[in-house]
Amino acid sequence: MENSNFKIKFVAIGHVDTGKSCLCGHLLYKCGFIDKHSMDKIRQRAIKDKMERWVWSRVLDIYEEEMVKGKTHEFNLIDFNYNQKDYQLIDTPGHQMFVRSMIEGISQDVNICVLLVSMIQNEFESSFEKGMLKEHLILARAMGIRHLLVIGNKMDAIDWDQEKYNKNMGLIKKFLKYIQWRENNVHFIPISAFEGIGLTDLENMPNWYKGKSFLDTLDDLPNKVKKKQIVKDKSPTKQIVAEIKLFNIKDIVVSNGFISNCHFEGEECELTFGKIKDKKTGKFKNIFKNGDVCYCSLTCNKNIDVYTDMKLIFRKDDNTIGFGKVIKYK
């Protein structure tokens, strides 16, 4: 018998202005989360404010400042129902200033990540080369999210051009391979969030697309999250054993005693490297190499419970430089 409390949970990530909140807002409307009368009031307010471009995003806007600027600052968590199935969506901010809120959003025991990508060429290039697209993928990978839906949004703006879509998605596939995201766990879908095409059905979708709609693809993915084996510990410093991968650290020598800032359950903590064990040989050594097992001290400002498989995110100068997971709590 299916658990009546079971929800299909997913988190929306991506660079600013790729249409995350637009997707979520229009999806909620199509699923009956908001009625036509309420939507008409939102649309009238958007027209009055000369913000029609963000009309669907306003379904999610909570703070008055967001209503004015059309940006998401905090992550929004909303439950909705469609075709007798329960869903929970988490809409996260795309701006670099709000990375911490984004990390908190992807820390909500979620196993499915939805990456929004603009197919308008200059917007795609900006997000891929200099924006937060890669950073968000690394963070989602670091948090152990298994399944990824890459959504090519704003397809209506490029007349549903298959060649442009395939070219941009090819670049993303190459990067996903670099961060070791399993190919079988990634799905690619073209949509228009603003027009609502491709969200709940295939009406008005191009003939060249042979896949399913966004919601149908979401329904097919396994959504169970591994149960946490939590260890209660009130001390600010915790002794852990972690498997760690670092990258983009050419000028840094990581050795015994090295101290790094990391995110742990959405909180900023300080991690001190202790003994370093070579993953292949099992021997202890002085210099860290990617994938090694490290005996570490983790110091947090807040009392945070620890559990096996807990994720660590390492950041330096506003960039993610690595990630790890707790394999043992001492």
Image (cartoon, grey):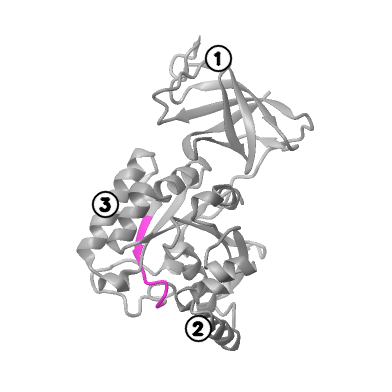
Q: CA distance from mark 1 to mark 3?
A: 40 Å
Q: Residue at x 72, y 26 (%)?
A: 237
Q: Are circles 2 and 1 on residues that touch, CB within 8 Å?
A: no
Q: How many discs mark residues in the rendered view?
A: 3
- Magenta span contains residue 30: no
Q: Which-is-in-front pick, marks 2 and 1?
A: 2
Residue labelled with disc 1 = 256
From what the image shows, is residue 85 above or below residue 75? below
Question: SS of the residue at dot 1?
Answer: loop
Left or right: 74, with 177 as reference point: right
Give the camera-side residue of 241 and 74. 74
Whether residue 330 sits left or right of residue 127 in the image: it is right
* Span highlighted in magenta in the image: 187-195
CA neighbours of label 3 inside 10 A, class few (<14), some (14 to 19), many (20+)? few
Badge 2 element? helix
Residue 214 at least partly seen: yes
- Residue placed under numbered mark 2 in the picture: 47
Whole-Å distance between the Cαs marked 2 and 3?
Answer: 38 Å
**Spatial CA span between label 2 and label 1:** 59 Å
Residue 265 to residue 4: above or below: above
- SS category of the residue bearing label 3: helix
Q: Position of residue 26 (x, y in %)?
A: 49, 75
